Each structure stands twice: as C-alpha cells, then as structure tokens.
Image (cartoon, rainbow, N blue to C red):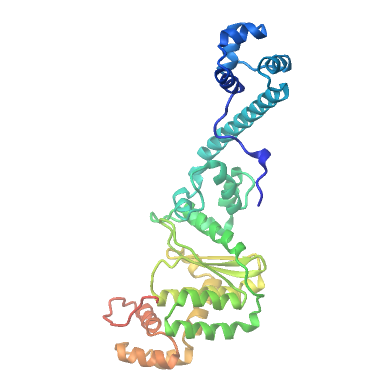
Amino acid sequence: MKTNINSLIPGVLIHPGEYLLDELEAKKISQKDFALMIGMQTSQLNEIINGKRAFNAETALLFEEALDITAEYWMNIQKNYELNLAKINRRNHERLEAIQLWNMAQSSLPVAFLKKQKIITGDPISDIPMVKDIYGIQNFDQLANLYSNNVYARFRKSQKLDMDKINMIGWVKLFEFKAKQEIVNAFDHNQFDNLLSELKVILSKNKKVKEKAKDALKSYGIKLIYQEKAEKTPIDGVSLWSEGNPAIGMSLRFNRIDNFAFTLFHELGHVLLHLTNDNTAEFIDLEHESEAYKNSKEEKEADRFAQSKLISDDLWNDFFNPPYYFSDTKVKEFAKKAKIHPAVVRGRICHETGNFAVRTKIKYDIN
C-alpha cells in the first residue's frame, strides 16, 4: 500500500525564519545590515528569524532581490510551514479528543486482556477504531445496549465473585471478531459423522491434537478458534454462526485432553443440533453456569451429544457397572475398544462417580 505523501506530518516543524538565518550566516550578512537593506525594522526581522512572524509575497520579493533566491522559494516554504502547522494542530486536537473518549470508555472495556492479546497498543488514536471493530459498534454509547443483550444477561446477574463480566463479554466479542477473519470450506451437516470419526482418531493418538482438530474442522466448514482466557473468565467454549459458517471458540483453560474432547464435542453438539436450524443462536458455556442455563434443553442436548459421540451408549452401559472400580488396565482396554483416548474414559468415570481423587498413571496432557 502506497503512502500518500500529502498526508504525512513532519516530526519536526522548521519555520522559514531558520532558512533565512542560514542564508544570512552563509553569506556573512548581519541581521542589522539585512534589515537595513530591505527596509525592515530589525525587531521585525528578528521575529521572522525566531519563528514569531510570517512573511508575505512582498517580503518574499525583497528576499529574492537581496539574496538572489526566488520569491517562489520563500513563499513555498512559508506555505508548507503553515500547512504542516495546521496538520499538527489538527492531529493534536484529534489526539486530545481520543484521549478524552478513551478515558470515558475504558472502564467498560477489558483493557488489560486486549493489551495482552496485542489487540490494542495504548495509543487511543489506533485503539478506538480497533475496539469499535471488535465490538461491532459505531460509538461507545452503544456498549450499554450491547451489555444488556439477552445473550449476556446471565453474566450481569451472576453473583460469582470470580467472574469479571466485562472480561467475559470482551473475550466473546474478540472471538467473534477473529472468527470473521477465518476462511474455511463450505459447511455440510450431512458430513458430520465423518468429521466426528476423524476427531476421535486424532484424540486417541494425542499427537498435535489442537492443530489437527482445527484443520479437520476447517476442511468440514467449521471455524475453530483457540483464544487464551482473560482474568476471571471461567469460559470453556462458545459456538455461533459466523459469515456463513459455524464457529467454535475454546479457551483451553485446562491442558487436559478429556476436557478438550468434551468441550469440543459439546460445542459440535450445539452446531449440529441448534445452529443448523438457527443462524442467530449463540451458546456460551461457562464453568459457573446458572442452574437454569445448565438445565436448559439445549445444554442437556449438547452434553448428551458429547457423551454419546465420544463413547457410544451401548459400549458405556456395558462398561460402567457397580462397584465402579476401574483400574488403569481396565480403562485402557475399554478405551481401545471404544477407539478413544484413555484419559477421556477416566474423565467420564470421575464425572459420573463424582470421585476426582482416583490415583492413575494415565496421562491427561494434550500433546
């Protein structure tokens, strides 16, 4: 992209008087003698040289005769000085307005999170339009309407002390913004079973899981964004429709393959069961959901989808029987049969028994 030279603003502004002083010194002419020569008060000439006074076309003609430098030259440097001075004044005015606007708005924005993500720099001139793009607003007054959106209502009503509502909404809006930039294949929900089979193979091998899962979803027309969580944002996943394709966001709060697998399949459940029939829906899954939200029809359906698609109901019902003691060997044998990673099996056992203190040598880390 070419830079328009006319839009450039000099870092240092040089008054025409400095050029005049250089010429006088080069020709070894004193200010007093030069003033006498052109019929000007020495004090007036001194004001020109010190940048306190401009000169006009008549003065430029006198400079031309006295110094053998064209009047056009003197008028051009005077004109350019005045133009650049106006640009600097305008820029300073714009910056002053931007600082004032930013100071009023930043209390409603996750500034620390956006800085950490290198989305904003601390310069309000560039940060303000970037934040407006991310939030999809024309002015900061619209933030109030955004925060009152029904999708975010449970953030505002939450009594959890460890949840920052501004950070939560900022995380979601940044995910939406990033998702719009992603280009993937056309989405076809009829290919969903093939996608799930590929994902289970990726999970069972546990090699470059995040990269391979993203590539697999991309080939099937689903956007997948991994985004670091902000402070006090107990978010696991988000799913919505983005520019004609489903999009899933994951915070990866835990570097565990069982959590990764369930969250991904839970959001895929939303995609297949809910988003394909409603391109305006948005599902945001938190660690501390309200009971009403957790028990909603859509959330229960997404949970059941994840459970049954990761491990078929028939296999699980045959395996999960009293007295509910499962050695690592037994878990690994079943995982091989179910074609899933053993940590996913162990994670589900812990979830269904409520016992998360089981000793195991099975590795949960994502590779």
Q: Is 42 above or below relative to 237?
A: above
Spot occupied by residue 4 in the image (x, y as percentages of width and height): 67, 43
Identified at 57% across, 82% down, the residue is 195
| Residue 9 placement: quadrant | top right
Residue 157 seen in render: no
Q: Is 23 above or below relative to 141?
A: above
Between residue 229 and residue 319, name the one nearer to us: 229
Spot occupied by residue 348 in the image (x, y as percentages of width and height): 39, 81
Spot occupied by residue 237 in the image (x, y as percentages of width and height): 49, 67
| Residue 73 placement: quadrant | top right
* Lateral position of residue 258 relative to residue 35, left or right: left
> Which corner quadrant holds the C terminus?
bottom left
Residue that protrudes farthest toward the left in the picture: 359
Identified at 43% across, 84% down, the residue is 205
Residue that protrudes farthest toward the front in the picture: 27
Spot occupied by residue 116 in the image (x, y as percentages of width and height): 44, 53
Between residue 316 and residue 321, name the one nearer to us: 316
Between residue 142 and residue 121, name the one nearer to us: 121
* Lateral position of residue 256 relative to residue 7, left or right: left
